[in-house]
Amino acid sequence: MNSSNERESFSQRLQQALKNAHYSPDSPTRLAREFNIRFDGRPITVHAARKWLVGEAIPTQEKLRMIAQWLGVPADWLRFGGPESAAPAGEGGNGLSRFESADVKLIADLQRLDEHHRQIAREFIRMLVRVNYQK
């Protein structure tokens, strides 16, 4: 497969994974924003996200792994394709690897707290989960 076809195929898989995860495959701005709040490395530009979506570029392996984790698909499927069964059609695995942007921001805020306040927040969340489970 030549490099142009590889990029186009990657773009199609990325768009499908975005749709399956309930994100628009038509918004490079949203893709860049969602990617950047999850990625610890250097942020991407909207232009880079657009290039991924239209098949002009493929992200680095490190970025590709993060995208796959976020969207709940296997990284090797996202990069190289393969059997349809390798790509989850809806929720990713156990649903724990994909977060909404508000959840990611909340986790980042939690990490900014000192250890004492983080522990209080964890206990509060566990209490809410127990109460919700008992309903």
Image (cartoon, rainbow, N blue to C red):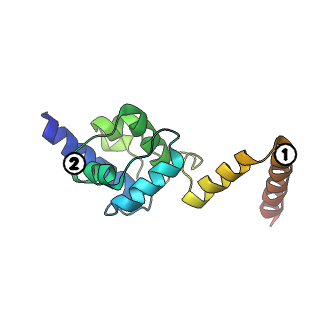
Residue shown at 54% from the left, 50% from the top: 98
Quarter holding residue 75: top left
Above or below, 133 against 71 in this view is below
Residue, disc 1: 119
Q: Residue at x 40, y 54 (%)?
A: 32
Neighbourhood count class around disc 2 (C-alpha, 10 Å): few under 14, some 14–19, many 20 upward:
some
Q: Position of residue 26 (x, y in %)?
A: 31, 63
> Judging from the image, what secondary structure is the residue with disc 1 in?
helix
| Count of marks, rendered view | 2
Q: Does residue 79 appear to the left or right of 114 in the view shown?
A: left
Quadrant in which the N terminus appears: top left
Q: Quadrant of the C terminus?
A: bottom right
For the residue marked with disc 2, what is the amino acid?
Gly
Q: Label 1 is placed on what type of residue? A: Gln
The image shows residue 105 at horizontal and vertical percentages of 62, 55
> On the image, which quarter does residue 16 sit in?
bottom left
First-in-chain label (1 vs 2): 2
Q: Secondary structure at mark 2?
A: loop
Viewer-nearest residue: 82 or 96: 96
Q: Residue at x 30, y 48 (%)?
A: 13
Front-most of 71 and 31?
31
Q: Is residue 103 left or right of residue 128?
A: left
Q: For the point 28% across and 48% down, which residue is it?
A: 52
Q: Would you name the residue on which mark 2 appears?
A: 55
78 relative position to 110: left or right: left
